[in-house]
C-alpha cells in the first residue's frame, strides 16, 4: 500500500495558477506528473490572489490543520513574496525584514508539527524595479531555508531570462503567465519536487 501523502500548496496567485487557461498552474502540473508516475497524492491548493506573506502567515496554519491530520505523510509547499514587494502608497506592502520574519515563523511552526516543507521562490513579473526588490527577497528566503535545512527552489533568476515566461507575462496582465509559462516554472521546480517527495 502506498503512503497517504497529503500536500498543502500555500501562497498567492501564482500558487493558484492565475492566468493559466488549463487551470493547472505549476502546482497542478507537478501533482499530475506525480500521479502519472504511479505515486498518487492528495493535493490542496490554498493560493489566494494579492496575499502577502503576512496574510498567508495569518491563515495558513488553520487551513493546513484541517487537511493534514495525524498519521499521514503531511507536507506543505510555500510560495509568496511578489505581493510583499509591490510598491503601494509610497512603500512596499511588506518590509523585507517582516517578510523574512514571516517565513521564519512559518517554517518553525511547520517543523513543530513534523510537516515536511518545500519553499518556491517568488517569480519575476513585467516590472524591472519590482523584480529587483523581489530578487533581494529571494536571496533572503534562500538563506532562511538553508539555515532551517528546508529545500528552496531558486526559480526567480532563471525565469527572469526565460523568453517564454517573459513573453507570456508581458502579453498577459503583466504578472501572470499562461499555460506555457507555468509549464516552464513547473519544469524548474520539478527536480526539487521529486527529491523532496522521495524523502
Image (spheres, grey):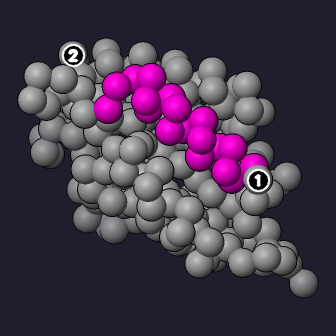
Residue identifier under label 2 = 129
- The secondary structure type at the circle numbered 2 is helix
Residue at the spot 61% in from the left edge and 76% down from the top edge: 67
Q: Position of residue 47 (x, y in %)?
A: 39, 60
As displayed, is residue 12 above or below residue 154?
A: below
Residue identifier under label 1 = 112
Q: Is residue 105 left or right of residue 41?
A: left
- The secondary structure type at the circle numbered 1 is helix
Q: Is residue 30 visible?
A: yes
For marks 2 and 1 on the same chain, the one whose residue lies earlier in the sequence: 1
Q: Is residue 38 visible?
A: no
Q: Which mark is residue 101?
A: none
20 part of magenta stretch? no
Q: Nearer the viewer, mark 2 or mark 1?
A: 1
Quadrant position of residue 92: top left
Q: Position of residue 109 (x, y in %)?
A: 67, 51
Q: Position of residue 184 (x, y in %)?
A: 44, 42
Amino acid at each position: 500500500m502506498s503512503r497517504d501523502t497529503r500536500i498543502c500548496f500555500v501562497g498567492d496567485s501564482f500558487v493558484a495558477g492565475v492566468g493559466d487557461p488549463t487551470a493547472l498552474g505549476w502546482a497542478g502540473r507537478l501533482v499530475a506528473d506525480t500521479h502519472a508516475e504511479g505515486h498518487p497524492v492528495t493535493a490542496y491548493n490554498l493560493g489566494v490572489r494579492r496575499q502577502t506573506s503576512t496574510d498567508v502567515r495569518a491563515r495558513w496554519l488553520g487551513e493546513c490543520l484541517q487537511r493534514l491530520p495525524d498519521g499521514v505523510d503531511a507536507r506543505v509547499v510555500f510560495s509568496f513574496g511578489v505581493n510583499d514587494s509591490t510598491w503601494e502608497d509610497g512603500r512596499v506592502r511588506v518590509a523585507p525584514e517582516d517578510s523574512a520574519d514571516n517565513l521564519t515563523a512559518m517554517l518553525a511552526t511547520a517543523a513543530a508539527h513534523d510537516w515536511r516543507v518545500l519553499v518556491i521562490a517568488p517569480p519575476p513579473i513585467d516590472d524591472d524595479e519590482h523584480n529587483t526588490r523581489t530578487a533581494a527577497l529571494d536571496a533572503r528566503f534562500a538563506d532562511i531555508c538553508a539555515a532551517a535545512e528546508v529545500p528552496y527552489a531558486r526559480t526567480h533568476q532563471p525565469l527572469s531570462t526565460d523568453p517564454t515566461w517573459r513573453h507570456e507575462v508581458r502579453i498577459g496582465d503583466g504578472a501572470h503567465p499562461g499555460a506555457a509559462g507555468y509549464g516552464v516554472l513547473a519544469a524548474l521546480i520539478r527536480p526539487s519536487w521529486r527529491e523532496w517527495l522521495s524523502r
